[in-house]
Structures are given as structure tokens and as C-alpha cells.
Amino acid sequence: MPDPEPLDTHQKALSINLDAHAFGSFAEIGAGQEVARWFLQVGAASGTVAKTISAYDKEVSDDLYGAGTRYVSRPRLQSMLEHEWAQLLSQLNATRGATTRFFSFVDTVSARNFAGDNECHGWIGLRFQMQPFGPPSDVILHINLRDNSNLAQQAAVGILGVNLIYASTHNLSSAVEFLAQIAADLPLSRIEIDSVALKGPAFDHWDPRAVHATLVANQHAEAVVFPFDGDLVPCTDLLYKKAVVIAPAAYNLTERLNGQMLQAALASLPKQDLAQSKGSIGFFSFRCAAAANDQSADLTVPQILERVDALQKLGSGVLVFRQREIYKLAAFVNRFTKARIHVAAEIPVLMRALQDNYADLAGGLLEGIAHLFRENVRLSIFPTPVSAMQGGLAAAVLNGWKWKEVNGFVGARDLEPPEPMNHLYRYLIGSNFILPMNLPAK
């Protein structure tokens, strides 16, 4: 038999309303009451909705959930979840608990404002029971809203909320299935899920790091971060208004990457960059999607975690990005900070950036380079051992690149690209877009 057609949002909301054992409350701040609206408009809402509330006013919100936290934050969401769950059980557990699987859905969202100059993101939470009188399980998501209008962002939050409540009943067999259901009908161009926190019996058998890696491997997020301390948080928590250094880890260069290079780039950040930001932070990074002309497959979740483990042993966190081009990585980071981004890399990464054909851009190489440096990027290029140049860049040699060796290394100033690239290359160095670095002290 063919697989049944997937349910749309209307059908999912109605099926939950018709489930005689599911009953819960909705508390939403920001982006309207789009999740509750679905359940109220599809019919039979009295079978599901115990209460819906929208505490928009800050004083009202503080009175309900406590003061002292940012309104769009995980601590605020956690306070909402605890308050709504406690109230739901205190009012209904005695009379309905024996036959009801209770849930509380909460969200606090900053949708696009009138000026269009705010960070469009939010926190989504769900606490639910798998059986009557059962212990609760929690799901907490951080999302980035990618639509260009407030109304479209509201609609996306509504779909996501319905998907989450539906998935908590029907799609708990694996993290892949669960996340796919949450993101159903919401492509990455609309909503990005870059952090998932899970707790309770529904998720006891899931590996949190594997769930985190699945977000980027299965195109639910452009990137996820694995901090050095192991606390899995959304990218905005670490990158917000920071001066950022990123060290791309090319697949054939992993064994030569070291924390000294990253630390040297951090130490050389201009004082002006630091003065205009909230400190600095550095990450190793790698992509998980294969290049368009690459015969290899995308990295699997186990492969992603293996590379993360290897890089974290070098002393820094890791940013796992879907796409290959450095300018796309820089554009992603620039969503969270206006400080200059420094890419700490060796010669092969620089040569790749200058040889890529940028087939997805009408202007090819010139447009790709313009995109890269328009994103307020500087390439901090460290000397590379000659052995690595000879072993990993045969194709580049055949394309006319030359270099000279200095004490067994090749530096940025020792490169000689072929005509006419050499003119552009000298301009980029002379204009300080490419910053030749010294070998880091051992």
C-alpha cells in the first residue's frame, strides 16, 4: 500500500481536538496567538483547549511569571512553562487526571517589528504526559524566523506549534522522525530550529548531541554550535554582539589545525573591534553538506559528532555549518553581530576561496569575493607547511599557482597566483582584506 498522504496543519489540529484524552493550555507572548488560533478555528476546540492566554504587557507578564529575565529568553519560557503546568494540574488533575494526558504549550517570540530592525526569533516550549497521571516530558526549541513580514512569521509559528503538539503524540520513535514532523511544511527559508532541549521519559533514550547534530544534518538549521563546555545552546547565545574568529577545518587539514592558530587570531583582534563588541569568541568550523561538484555524500550525524569531538580536543568550540562557501558562513554570523568577522585559516582555505567558480552567483568569482568582504570579513592567513602544500594542492599547482618556501613554510605573501588573479590578490593584501599572519608561538 502507498504511504498515506501527510496531514496538513488543519487536519493535525482537528485530530488533536478529537482526541478525547488530550487536554491542555496555551500561553503565547509575541507573534499573536497563532498556535491556539488553529485549535479554536478547526472545530471541537472544547475537547482540547483548557485555557489560552496572551500576556503582552510587561507588568502583567512579570506578575504571572516573575520579573528579572529578558522577555524573549529561555529563562522566561521556563517560568511560563512551570507556571502554566502547575496551574493546569491544580485546577484539573483531581477531576480529569485519571483519563487525560495533559499538556501545556508556551512560547515567547519576537516577530518582525514595525521598523524591521529587530532580531526575529523565539522560544517554544511544550510539557506533556504520555499517559494519564504519567510523569511529564519537556521540549524546548529556539527558533529563528526567516520570513520577511510579521504576518508570515506569525503564520509560521502557528504551524510549528501545531506540528510540535502533534509530534509529541505520534512521532516519538526517533529524533529524526520527531524533528521532521516539527518542521513539516516549514522549509529552512521560513523557520530555523537551532537548539532543542529535551527532558523526561519520552526522550530518555535519545542522545542530546545527536539530536543537535540532526538539526544541521537534516536541514532544520543553517548551523549549530557545539560549545567547548558542552552546553548545547543556540548560536545567538554565543555570537550575539561578539567579535568572532572562525577557523575553517578543511577535511584534509584536520590533523594540522591547532588551538594556537585560533588563539593567535583572537589575540590579534584590533582594539577597535573589541571596543565595539561584547567581547570576543573563537570557533573551529566545518561544513556537513557536500559541494555541488563533489561525489561524496553529506556527513552523517555520527560523522559530524566524530569531527566535533576531534576539534573540541584542540581546545575550542565548533560551529557546524551546512554550506561550503565562506561568505555564506559569514552572512550567517552577521545575523547576530555587527563586529568584524576574522577567518583564521591556512593557505589552502584562501586558495579555495579564490579559485571557487561560485556557480550559484551570476557574477561568478568576482561576485563571490565581493559577497565575502561585503560581510565585514577579514582573512587572517597563517603559514602552511610545504609538505601540506605539495600533498593537498596538486590541482592548484596545475592551475598556475606558485609559491616560495621560507623555513619549510609558505605564507600569504609568498604566494603568486596566475595572471590575472595575481593583480586582485595583491589588491586584497594591500587593502588589508587578507591579513598575512606569523606562525603562532608554540
Image (cartoon, rainbow, N blue to C red):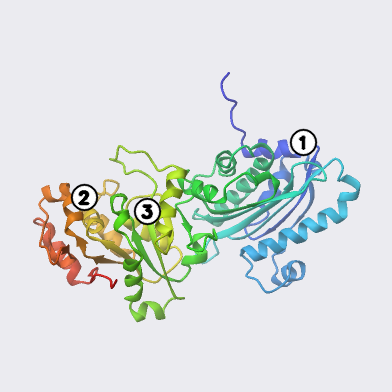
Give me the disc on residue 157: none
Of residues 440 and 153, the one nearer the viewer is 440
Whether residue 127 is visible, yes or no, is yes
Q: Earlier in the sequence, mark 1 or mark 2?
A: 1
In this figure, which residue is indicated by the disc labeled 2? 392
Whether residue 54 is visible, yes or no, is no
Q: Could you say which quadrant of the image residue 388 lies in?
A: bottom left
Q: Earlier in the sequence, mark 3 or mark 1?
A: 1
Name of the residue lying farthest toward the top: 1
SS label for mark 2: helix
**Amino acid type of the residue that numbered disc 2 sits on in the rendered structure:** Gly
Instruction: Classify residue 139 as left or right of residue 95.
Output: left
Dot 2 crowding, Cα within 10 Å, few <14, some 14–19, many 20+: some
Percent across and percent down for residue 134 are: 79, 45
Dot 3 crowding, Cα within 10 Å, few <14, some 14–19, many 20+: many
Vertical order, 267 against 367 (above or below): below
In this figure, which residue is indicated by the disc labeled 3? 286
Name of the residue lying farthest toward the front: 442
Q: Could you say which quadrant of the image residue 181 lies in?
A: top right
- Disc 3 to disc 2, C-alpha distance: 17 Å
In this figure, which residue is indicated by the disc labeled 1? 18
